[in-house]
Amino acid sequence: MRIPALPRPRSLAGQLFAMQAVLLALVVAGYALFTYVNGHSQAEDAARRQATAVARSIADAPSVRTAIHTFDPSAELQPYALRVQKDTGVDFVTIMTPGGIRWTHPDPDQIGRPFLGNIARALRGETFTETYTGTLGPSVRAVTPVKEDGRVIGLVSAGIKVEAISERVREQVAALFSVAAGVLALGAIGTYVINAQLRRHTHGMNATELSRMYDYHQAALHAVREGLLMLDAQHRVALIN
């Protein structure tokens, strides 16, 4: 009965190449994951700052305070809010009464209906941000008061949908993975070149074969009765028994 030959173990150079490639892949993957998590947090912070800046600029606009005192505030505020929304890149701008009734909204059918979100802090004169699910879905929004002579005469909310924030992060991560793939490829090529040199020096032998050859040479040297001294090209001692 013929015993099937066992597969020859991978050479030492091949083993080192595999370990280095796996290690490099793990480092790149870990960095990509860290960047994704950190990038999402940074994207949310950026969205909060953007929404706050837009809401405050609207609340400070004299034309907004003037429009609030007109018979039909929505007639002037709705076109203005849509224009600001388009120019600033936010997903919605809602200007409302102190009671939370909308004067403006990206969906005209929502005008005149109650704002979905918290307004208590804004009524106390504060500007704040929150993540809330409204008519457009989950969003990061800022709410700020419109003041006149120390009184709150209206409220402004500007926000960016969470979906839009996630899309920004996905674009950043896609670019990151492209760079990571390039780094991984360059690292693999460099590792391969280094290990090719090692493979030539070890003649493609694996660790077991190298150990066996060392033991054989040691045994052969000690079996020689005469003294043996070998010098290299620079006349340095290379081998002695």
Image (cartoon, grey):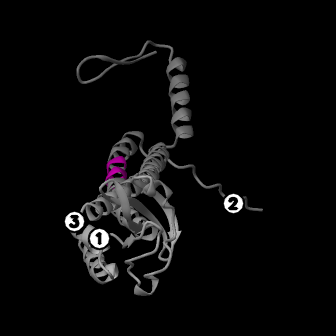
Closer mark to the observer between disc 3 and disc 1: 3
The residue labelled by disc 1 is 89
User: Where does residue 18 sit, x and y in percent of width and height?
Assistant: 48, 49
Q: Residue 132, image x and y in percent?
A: 51, 64
Query: First in sequence: mark 3 or mark 1?
Result: 3
Which of 53 and 226 lies nearest the eye of the viewer?
53
Stretch in magenta: 185-191
Mark 3 to mark 1: distance in Å?
Answer: 22 Å
| Three-letter residue code for mark 2 | Pro
- Across and down, in percent, residue 79 comes to 27, 81
**Mark sitting on residue 4:** 2
Disc 3 marks which amino acid? Pro
Is 222 magenta? The answer is no
Quadrant position of the N terminus in the picture: bottom right
Residue sitting at x 44%, y 46%: 27
SS assignment at label 3: helix
Distance in Å between CA atoms under marks 2 and 1: 69 Å
Residue at 49% of width from left, 21% of height from top?
Answer: 221
Q: Say if mark 3 contacts mark 1, CB within 8 Å.
A: no
Secondary structure under tag 2 reads loop
Quadrant housing residue 238:
top left
The 10 Å Cα crowd at callout 2, few under 14, some 14 to 19, many 20 or more, is few
Which secondary structure, mark 1? loop
**Amino acid marked by disc 1:** Gly
> Which dot, 2 or 1, sits closer to the camera?
1
Which residue occupies the foreground of this view, 195 or 232?
A: 195
Left or right of 59 in this view: 124: right
**Majority secondary structure of magenta residues:** helix
Could you tell me which residue is drawn at 32 percent across and 48 percent down? 190
- Badge 3 is on which residue? 62
Residue 20 lies left or right of residue 2; in this view the side is left
Task: State the separation of the CA atoms marked 3 and 2.
Answer: 90 Å
